[in-house]
Amino acid sequence: MADEEKTDAMLSPYRVLDLTDEKGQLAGKLLGDLGADVIKIEKPGGDPSRNLGPFYHDEVDPEKSLNWFAFNTSKRGVTLDIEKPEGQEIFRRLVKSADFIIESFPPGYMDSLGLGYSELEKVDPGIIVIAITPFGQTGPYRDFKAPDIVLWAMGGRMFAIGDADRPPLRMSHHSQAYIQAALDAGLSAMMALNYRQMTGEGQFIDISIQTALVQSGETGWDLRKRFQPRGGMRNPGVQITRTWSCKDGLVTWVYMPGQFRAATNIAFVNWLDSEGMATDFLKEFDWEEFDYAEVTQEIMDRLEEPTAKFFMSHTKLELLEGAVQHRILFYPQFDTTDLLESVQLDAREYWVNLAHPELGTTITYPGPFAKLSETPIKITRRAPLIGEHNHEIYEDELGIPGEEISKLKQAGII
Amino acid sequence: MPQKSLEGIKVLDFTIVIAGTFITRMLANHGADVLKIESRSHPEIFRQFGPFKDDYPEPFNPWNNRGGSFGIWNVGKRSIALNLADPRGIEIAKRLVSWADIVVENFAGGVLKRMGLGYEELVKIKPDIIMLSSCMQGQTGPHSKHPGFGTQLVNLVGLSTITGWPDREPASVGAYTDIIAPRFSVMAILAAVDYRRRTGKGQYIDLSQYEAGVPLLSPLILDNVVNKRVASRVGNQSEYAAPHNAYPCRDRHTDRWCAIGVYTEEEWRSFCKILGDPPWTKDDRFNTLRARRENEEELDRRIEEWTINLHPDDVVRRLQLADDPVPVKRLYTGRELQEYEWDVKHRSPYTVPHNVYRCQWEDRWCVIAVYTDEEWHSFCKVIGNPQWTTDSRFNTFEGRKENEEELDRLIATWTVNRTPEEVMNLMQTAGIPAGIVATGEDLIEHDLQLKHRHAYHELAHPEIGVYHGVAPSYEFSKCQAEVERAPLMGEHNESVLKELLGMSDEEIKELIREQIVE
C-alpha cells in the first residue's frame, strides 16, 4: 500500500491497476481525478480500444483516439503481457503495491491466467478487485456477447425511447451503457474501501452492465401491468408539441398539466405577455383545469400557435437566460458547441486545458465533476501514450534493472 | 465483523425525486443508516406520483404513501416529517445534523442555505460534517438558482441532440441525468468519508448535475474542440459533410429515400456536374464546406428538387457511376433511413448487421450485431442458410456494409416470424451478439439473468401491497446488499426523536400538537 500520510487529494494514498477496455475506462479516470495513482495496463502494442474514433484531425492512429483521450486522463500507462508467465510475475508485484484492480475481461479470463481474485487475495489480502462484464460473472447469460446495442436493449432502456411507429432507439455514438457500469465500478470501489478500513479485508466486486441499466430504471410494469408507450403518454387524438424551433436551433417545452406545472406555465405565459406575444386565450387559460385526457386539438392549437411564434423570435441563448430569469422549467437543446460556450460552465471555470506536447497542442476537456471545499478534484494529466511510463514504473518504482527491461521488451512482455 | 460495507455511516437525507433519492438509496443498499427528512413546505413530490397499484388514479395528496416511484427510489430509508417552515422544525433538523456523518440535499441552488441549513451553519454544529449539495447547475455562477428536473437538463447537457432519428426531432431520453449525477455523488461522498478518516476533516461537495452530465459526451466534445465537428443524432445532416442528408425520391408515397453525403471539395464539384451544373451551385453560399453548412437548409431544398423527380436507384446510379463518384445510399423506408449508418467510422465501423429487428407479436423487437466474418457465417447457419445469404454482395464485410439496408430487410423477414427470445437464444448459442428489447415485464418476470442475480426484490408494503425494489449492479463477495421497502411518511418520527435525540413522550406529543413534527 502506498504512503498513508499523503493526504493532499482525497484518494492520494491509493493505487489503482486499470486493465479495462472501453467498458470501464471511465472508472479509473475518475479515481485518478480524485487523486489515486492509476496505472493503465495495456497489452504490448496498446489497448484495442485505442482504435475507437473519433480521432485527432481524423487521423486513424492508436495515439490519436479522442475516445481514448476522453476516458484515460489522470492515469499513467504501462504495457504488459499478462498472458505470459514473466508478465504475470510483474503483474503480481504491481498488485502488492496496489489497492484496487479494475478489469473488464470476459468472465473467467483472469482465473484462467491464475490471476483471479482467489489468487490475488493471496498476494495482497487487502486487494479490491472490480470486474465489469455485460451480464456478470455467473448465470445463464454470462457468456452472451453484448455490445452497447444489446445491453441497451436488454437493460430495458431502449424500449421506451423513440416513436411509437418506429423501432426503439439507443443514444447515438459511443456507449452510454458502459459509462453507467464504469460509474458503478468507481462508487462500489469506494464502498469496498470503507469495508476494508473497518476490517482490513479486500473483496471481489462483480458488476453486470445489464444490471447497471436495470437498477437505474423504472419498469413501468411493476404496479401498472402495462408499459409506457414509446413516445410517451398523451391523449391519442391530440398532438402536443415537445420540440420547437427557435431562431438558431431547437428547444424543448411542453405545456404540462398538474398543479406543479401550473406555476411554470403561468410564468411562461407572463414572459410572452411581457413581450406582447401572449394572446388573450393564453393569458386567460385556466392551467389548474388543464388535463391531457380532456384537452382538444383546437385548444392545444390555440395554446401552441403564439408559443411557436415566440420561440421563433428568440435564440437558444435568449431562451436559456429567460428561463433562468423567470424561473421557468425548460431548456434549449444544446449541442457540443453550445456546451463549450456555456456562460454558466465558464463562470464555474469548468473546462480544463491539457497539454499534448507530442501533438504540439493543448486540448480542452470536460473538467472535475464536482467542486470540493477541502480537496479539489484535479485532472492531472492527459491520457498516457502506449507504454509511456514503462521505465518510470518498472525501473524506478519496481526496481527492475535496465537490461532486464530490454530483455522483457524483446520477448514482447512489455 | 460488519456485514455491510457502509455499516455505521449515518446520513441525513433532504433529497427529493430521483436525482437526490438515488444517492441515498445506494448508500442505504449497502448498510448506511439513512434518515429522510420530509416536509409539507418542501414536499417530496414523488409521494404524489404514480405508478399506483393497478394503475388506479389517486387524488392529489402530498401525504400519499402509495406512490410507486417513491417506493422504488427510497428503499431501506427511515422517514421523519418535520415542519421546516417553522424555526422549531429547523432546530430539530440541526440536532439531527449532530447525529449525522453526511448530509445530502438536492434542492434548487441556495434553498437549504436560506432555510438556515447551509454548510456554514452545519459546520458549526458538526465541524467534520460531509455535506453534498446536488442541484441543476451548481451553487455558484449566474444560473445557480434555476430550479428544474432531469427531463429538462438532458437538453442543456446535449443528450437530446444526439438521440433520435435523423429525419425527426430528437427523441425524449427521459430524466437521464437523474441517474448519472447520483453515481458521481456517491463516489465523491465516500471518497470524502475516507479522507475524513485519515485527516479528521469534513468538507462541502458542490455537485452540478450539469457538470456531471457533460462527461457523458466527452469524446464528442473533444471531437468538437479538435475537429470542429458538432455531433448530432446519427445520420443527421450536421455531422461530417454537406450536403449530408436523406432526400425523398419519386414514389414518395411509398417512403423512398436516398442519402447523399458530400465530404470533399472534389466530391462537391463532381456532384454539381452530375446535377448539370445549375446556376445556384455557383452561388457563394455554397462555395465552401463551411458556407454550405451555414446554408444547409437552402442547399437541401435545392437538392430535393432534383431527387424528387428521380427513382432512388437512378440517384444511386448517377452518383456512383460518375467519373468521380459521390457517396450515396438508397434507403427503402423511413425505418431504414433512421438506422442507416452514414458515417461508418463513427457509429459502428466493425458491425454489420447492427440493428433493431421486428419480431413476432405486437411491438416486439430484438437487436443483432455481427462483428466478424466468423460471426457472419454462424449467423447464416442459424437462420438456415437461405439462398440470399450466398449472394456475392454479402460475401465480405465491405459488401455487407455497402448493402446494409437490403441486408436488414432480409434479416427482418426471418426475425418477424420468431419471438425475440427465440432470436436471442439461437444467436447467442452460436456466439452472435443479440438480445431482446426488454419491456418492464421482461425485466421483472422473465429475464433469467436478472433472476439469477436477484435483481428484483419483492417487497411487502403496508399501503401498496407487494411491489419490487431493485438491487445494485455491483455484487460484493463479502457484503450483501439490502433492499427493504420504502418508509411511510413520517413513519419513524417517534423512534428517531426518542432514540437519536433522547426526547420524552411528553416532548414528542407537544411537537406533534404544535405541528412541528408533521
Image: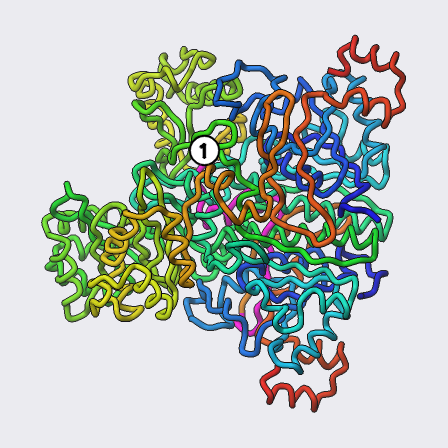
- Which residue is at a point 68% across and 34% down the rendered structure image? B484
Q: Nearer the viewer, residue B442 or B292?
A: B442
Residue B395 visible within the image: yes
Question: Looking at the picture, how far across and down is residue B449, in whole percent?
Answer: 53, 49
Q: Which residues are magenta?
A: A331-360
Query: Dot 1 lies on which element?
Result: helix
Amino acid type, label 1: Leu
Q: How is the structure coloured here?
A: rainbow
In percent of width and height, residue A367 lies at 61, 53
Look at mark 1 in the image and give the residue it sits on: A319
The answer to whether residue A187 is magenta is: no
Residue A346 in the magenta stretch? The answer is yes
Q: Along the line of sight, which residue is nearer the eye, B213 or A128? A: A128
Front residue of B218/B384: it is: B384
The relative height of residue A225 versus residue B315 in the rendered view (above or below) is: above
> Residue sitting at 22 percent across and 53 percent down?
B331
For residue B228, above or below residue A241 = below
Q: Looking at the picture, how far across and down is residue A252, in whole percent?
A: 42, 34
Residue sitting at 40 percent across and 12 percent down?
A285
Q: Quadrant of the C terminus of chain B?
A: top right
